[in-house]
Amino acid sequence: MIPLVILQEVQQFKQVSNSINTAKFNELVLQVQQVEIYPLLGEDLYWAVINNASSYVDLLDGGTYDYQGKTYQNVGLKAVISHYWYAYHSFYGDQIDTAFGLREKLNNDVSKQVDVSMKKTLFEHNSKYAFNLWLNVERFLERTNEPLYRCGTKIKNTHFIISKIGL
């Protein structure tokens, strides 16, 4: 599978170091594409974009478009992927895996455990922001009548669970 974003494109949206591990970067991009983007686009559109990204430049890069006499802005799927990637990176990819568990480097000699609540907060915040960006991209797909988007294969995002407490 092909990553739809590269580091330089993510850096347009988030402050990310140039020295990030390329294999880890690509691993998280592919994970985001499969876990977050695939259910949002639906199977047909997802695979069409993966297999022929050059045909979906407006979807990926975003830009302006006209709908019913008004001009709108599509933020682009790369923005959505970038923010989801940052959420995953904040939770999974920013730490060093050692024999003593995940560590956060403070300087050359000192490291400490990464606070789980901070990682969770960053993950949740960036995931929520990415999903709000997705809503903008979804309106673009609907308004431009992308034929592969409404093909009956769209899967709802199932990350949110509502449960009733009590009787």
Image (cartoon, helix red, strand yellow):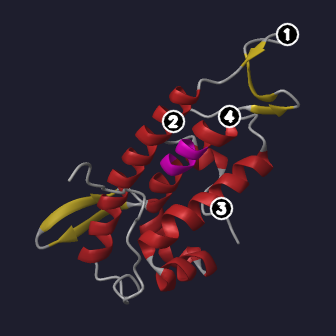
Instruction: Identify the residue at horizontal 37%, vertical 56% (top origin).
Output: 160
**Prevailing secondary structure class for the magenta stretch in the rendered image:** helix
**Res. 80 image quadrant:** bottom left
Which disc is residue 144 wearing?
none
Q: Amino acid at mark 3?
A: Leu
Above or below for 112 versus 43: above
Disc number at residue 94? 4
Placement of 2 over or under 48, stated as above or below: above
Instruction: Work out how far the residue at label 3 is from the one at label 4, CA to CA, in angstroms.
Output: 17 Å
Disc 3 and disc 2: Cα gap in Å? Answer: 21 Å
Q: Earlier in the sequence, mark 1 or mark 2?
A: 1
Q: Which residue position holds label 1?
A: 109
Question: As displayed, is residue 28 above or below residue 37?
Answer: above
- Residue at 50%, 57% (x, y): give it: 78
Depth check, mark 1 against mark 2: the one in front is: 2
Residue at point 32%, 52% (across, down): 132
Q: Which residue is mark 3?
A: 30
- Asked whether, in this view, residue 42 is left or right of residue 163, the answer is right
Q: As drawn, is 40 to the left or to the right of 90? A: left
The disc at residue 120 is 2
Mark 3 neighbour class, 10 Å CA radius: few under 14, some 14 to 19, many 20 or more: many
Q: Is residue 1 above or below residue 62?
A: below
Q: Residue at x 49, y 86 (%)?
A: 44
* Labelled pair 4, 1 in contact (Cβ < 8 Å): no
Q: In front here: 29 or 67?
A: 29
How many angstroms separate mark 3 from mark 1 (CA)? 33 Å
**Mark 3 or mark 1: whose residue is earlier in sequence:** 3
Q: Quadrant of residue 52?
A: bottom right
Dots 4, 2 in contact, CB < 8 A: no
The magenta-colored residue range is 83-88
